């Protein structure tokens, strides 16, 4: 099958998914930005004079890239997962199932829209928080690369979660017991070098850590591990999660009889 037929209709579904979150932007964009700002104000105020992770980098500045990337990841996941579970529960998913959309079109549309939402929220968090404490931008290419890969991976994970879940409490469990711990234990609020040995080892098997660390390297030129190594880990994880999402879509997992 050539590329064009496989992606036929993807643009229309993509626009529908973008409009879905944009029509309630106060909830889907403004609210996460406000949450990140509150994190910055509270943690920055409490720990500013007590914690210094990188030489010459104030804690509030250190915190900003982590909050930006956390917002990108959480909102990319939420977009695909919430859209699918709502469509399954309300029954309007049938309109997509009777269409000639391929699994590639589904994947591109859902993950693409998730990336847009994640990046829009991340940009909003950066613009607001950078006004409070400019973090700098030493290597912007790393910032762009990890933001794109991170949002793509979490969009694909949201797709998997949305396919798997059959009700809202299952989706909440996926988010609360998998996405949230992996995000908060990825070094958003600290450097993993400050952790005891066993927790450092656990952090290094968390792909979210490499997303945050590589993303932060673009702002300060400092990181806990090489950004090239982080790129390899995040790239491999993104490919693996995307391949699983595509295979589940191809099989019609929990969406086709």
Image: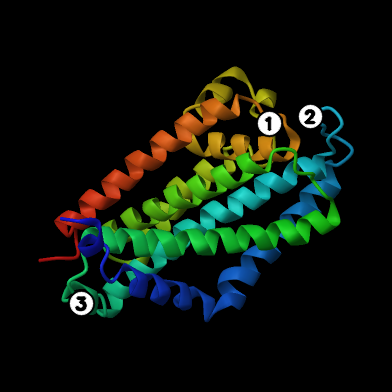
Closest to the observer, 2 or 64: 2
- Report how far apart the C-alphas of labels 2 and 1 lie in the structure: 9 Å
Earlier residue among tags 3 and 1: 3
Closest to the observer, 175 or 226: 226
Give the percent coordinates (x, y) of residue 76.
49, 58
* Tag 1 residue: 191
Q: Quadrant of the C terminus?
A: bottom left
Give the percent coordinates (x, y) of residue 18.
46, 72
Question: Left or right: where does residue 254 sit relative to residue 74?
Answer: left
Q: Residues within 10 Å of mark 3 (few under 14, many from 20)?
A: few
Do residues under tags 2 and 1 come within 8 Å of each other at their CB atoms? yes
Do residues under tags 3 and 2 come within 8 Å of each other at their CB atoms? no
* Tag 2 residue: 54
For the point 19% across and 72% down, the residue is 97
Secondary element at tag 2: loop
Secondary element at tag 1: loop
Give the percent coordinates (x, y) of residue 99.
19, 75
Residue 216 occupies quadrant: top right
């Amino acid at each position: 099958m050539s590329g064009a037929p496989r992606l036929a209709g993807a643009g229309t579904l993509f626009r529908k998914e973008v409009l879905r979150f944009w029509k309630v932007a106060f909830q889907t964009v403004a609210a996460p930005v406000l949450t990140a700002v509150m994190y910055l104000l509270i943690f920055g105020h409490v720990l500013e004079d007590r914690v210094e992770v990188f030489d010459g980098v104030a804690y509030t500045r250190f915190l900003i890239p982590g909050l930006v990337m956390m917002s990108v990841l959480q909102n990319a996941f939420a977009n695909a997962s919430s859209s699918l579970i709502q469509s399954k529960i309300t029954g309007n998913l049938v309109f997509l199932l009777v269409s000639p959309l391929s699994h590639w079109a589904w994947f591109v549309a859902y993950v693409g829209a998730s990336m847009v939402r994640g990046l829009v929220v991340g940009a909003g968090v950066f613009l607001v928080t950078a006004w409070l404490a400019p973090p700098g931008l030493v290597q912007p290419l790393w910032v762009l690369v990890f933001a794109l890969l991170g949002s793509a991976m979490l969009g694909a994970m949201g797709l998997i979660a949305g396919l798997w879940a059959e009700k809202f409490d299952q989706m909440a469990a996926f988010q609360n017991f998998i996405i949230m711990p992996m995000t908060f234990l990825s070094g958003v609020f600290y450097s993993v070098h400050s952790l005891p040995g066993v927790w450092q080892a656990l952090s290094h098997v968390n792909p979210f850590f490499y997303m945050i660390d590589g993303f932060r390297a673009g702002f300060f030129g400092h990181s806990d591990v090489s950004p090239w190594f982080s790129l390899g880990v995040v790239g491999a994880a993104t490919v693996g999660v995307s391949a699983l999402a595509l295979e589940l879509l191809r099989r019609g997992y929990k969406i086709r009889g």
